[in-house]
Image (tube, rainbow, N blue to C red):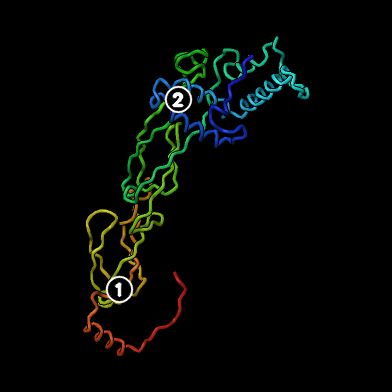
Amino acid sequence: MAAPKDYYKILEVDDKADADTIKQAYRRLARKYHPDVSGKAGEDKFKDINEAYEVLSDPKRRADYDRLRRGFAESQSRRRGQGFERVAWDWPGEDSGGFGSIFEDLFSQGHEPSRPYSQTIPEETVRITLEQVARGTTVALTVQDVRECVVCHGRDRNCPRCGGLGQVSEPRRFDVTIPPGIEDGDVLKVGDHARLKVEVVPHPRFQRQKDNLIGRLMVSVPVAAVGGEVPVRPLFGEEIMVKVPRHSNHGRMLRLKGLGLPHRGTSVKGDMLLEIVLRFPEPFTAEDDAMYEQLKNHHQEAGGEIHAPR
């Protein structure tokens, strides 16, 4: 009786590897040896990879396979007479089918149709910008789609399409619509084939707070003192003029209604919140010095109180 295939070696993992390690190894090797990548030369390797993953990804079938490997190794050691302690294994003798029939049972169950394939749904990640959050976007996603073999349905171990596994893995492309207002960390289900996790990349001008956009607005001290308008560039679109009320202190918040992000699934939009940050006009001249010196002498308030950071 020939030794059973070493599925751990085929997937290039240790026989103590956990389920995640096995899945990662399978995905890496399946991409590498897929016929679309490796051509006809990689077909046999690709079949072995799928065969190994089908067994090792199923806890019950993996346990059966591990017992098969241990039993075969023990049988071989007894035959060679190398002095190993005799161990009783709960396997049928060779006259009743032996390891060969057990190995076949891992796949065909006596050439009956193979049971439905249980596949862990992969999760992919896509990174999008705040601008794409505001308007929505569409991204292309390619996943390995496992389908039933229409040639043999798992009944023919010599099937040129699936090698008797009953299913084939093929790349499938999806155009996934990401709706406006989606949040960082949201996961979209792509049919029964994959999940798409959305990450929103940091923006140089705004931070997101639910549906609101928060930014810091630089305002010169004279404008903050007597009031005026300053140009502001929203998340997208042309500049708008924003009114700064007179006597605006550092840290004052200005709210611009409806210039935030859309609430997912609705037409309602959040607001843009701008925190005023005071700065002196540049260049600072001797005339400016004299004017501020006059203001300091005119106002006796020296300040100095301490407030906790907001």
Depth order, front residue of 49/178? 49
Say which of 235 and 228 sits in front.
235
Residue position for label 1 = 279
Question: Pointer 2: residues within 10 angstroms few (<14), some, or many (20+)?
Answer: some
Q: Position of residue 147 (x, y in %)?
A: 45, 23
Residue located beneath label 2 in the image: 169
Report the quarter where the C terminus lies: bottom left
* Percent coordinates x, y for residue 302 in the rendering: 38, 86
Residue 93 location (% of width, % of height): 72, 13
Tell me which numbered mark, 1 or 2, is placed earlier along the sequence: 2
* Distance in Å between CA atoms under marks 1 and 2: 61 Å
Which corner quadrant of the image does residue 226 belong to?
A: bottom left
Residue at position x 62%, y 34% in the image: 16
Amino acid type at image mark 2: Ser
In which quadrant of the rendered view does residue 229 lie? bottom left
User: Which residue shows up at 36% across the image and 61% down it?
Assistant: 214
- Residue 53 lies, with reference to residue 299, above or below; the image says above
**Amino acid, disc 1:** Arg
Viewport quadrant of the N terminus: top right
**In the structure shown, which secondary structural element does the residue marked by tag 1 occupy?**
strand
Q: Could you tell me residue 138's position as x and y percent?
A: 33, 40
